[in-house]
Amino acid sequence: MARANLIDANLTYNILPTISADTGRLSVTFGQQLLPFGQEVQATEDLKPTINNALFTSLGNLDLARRQVGLIFRGDAFPVVDYGYNYRAPILTYAFGLVNGNGPNKSDDNNNKDLVGRIALTLPSDYNSWLRQLSFGASIYRGKQNVFVNSGADLVDKGKKDRYGFDVAYNHHPFGVTYEYTDGRDEYATGTKATYSVAERVAMLEAITDIFPNVRITTFENRFLVNYAHGIDAHFIVRGIRTASDYEYERSMRYINSDLRPSISTVFLMPPREFAEVSSTMVKGMVGPNGWRHMVRRYLPQPVYDKILSDHEGSED
């Protein structure tokens, strides 16, 4: 099936009249349009000095070159005008607006709107001056993006998507020079989404260790493990090792822990052969096909097995 993708699709209304070149201008544009950010991003394809966009503006990098759907105000003030040369150079130009933030030809994928803004100052000079159209600009883009884990399968949060830019441009026909700096900061998630909450995991561990009166289950956040162990007056950290890669990682962590708290020792334990390859990822991958209940039972403590059964009640065995 054929599909058409629009490049620009918008409506513009001039709030201030554009009849006189001596006065400031202000317009508002609604629809799919270029972002008013920096020098290159807001230039249409026919005015770009190069065939392709700079890499930093492209999708997969700072992702500024794509059109966005939104409402953007653009204006200028204090223009320097020379009618003999058909020359108009506003001392102040500005733009600000709200956009969806997820690119062209798409519906919005979250309930957040992204803010974009720009301001630029051009030195006041007449057409014949060597300082003609020497400008300094600053841009900002602040937004939210969906954050996924498990290879994009699970949406877990909204993360920041911030861009800050500074540019200097000098355009004295037939010469022109542009310098542009942009910094981008994104929030994203690593790893995988936990199947069970902290409270659920604590409950299962308490049920498993209920027969041991000297075992206590606790949790902590945003602390090094070795510092937490020191805080509860523990003298040993016990770590399980299944594979060679586990050993390499745990050995490095053991040295770091020893540097932080020399009085705390790390003890490595190897599992029995029948459990050496067991992991939560492996067990979760077994759930679903016919006979999965019997298969996973041999690898799980009873409280964990009971929890999985209750969560998958009604599924076929």
Image (cartoon, rainbow, N blue to C red):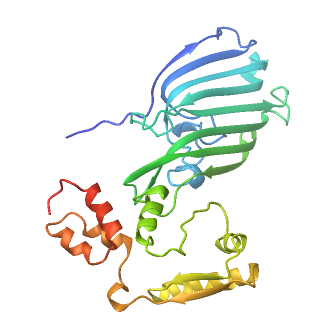
Task: Classify 25 as above or below 265.
Answer: above
Task: Classify 63 as above or below 30.
Answer: below
Q: Quadrant of residue 231?
A: bottom right
Total numbered circles: 0
Q: Quadrant of residue 9?
A: top left
In this view, the residue in front, 92 or 196, is: 196
* Picture quarter with the C terminus: bottom left
In this view, the residue in front, 145 or 303, is: 303
Place of residue 239 in the rendered image (x, y in percent of width and height, measured from the top left): 54, 82
Place of residue 128 in the rendered image (x, y in percent of width and height, measured from the top left): 83, 30
Place of residue 16 in the rendered image (x, y in percent of width and height, measured from the top left): 65, 10
Residue at left offset 75%, top offset 37%: 137
Residue at left offset 59%, top offset 41%: 41
Task: Classify 264 as above or below 85.
Answer: below
Residue at left offset 57%, top offset 64%: 218
In this view, the residue in front, 173 or 237, is: 237
* Picture quarter with the N terminus: top left
95 left or right, relative to 213: right
Place of residue 108 in the rendered image (x, y in percent of width and height, measured from the top left): 43, 34
Residue at left offset 25%, top offset 73%: 297
- Is residue 115 in view? yes
- Is residue 86 in view? no
Task: Classify 122 as above or below 23.
Answer: below
179 left or right, relative to 55: right
205 left or right, relative to 167: left
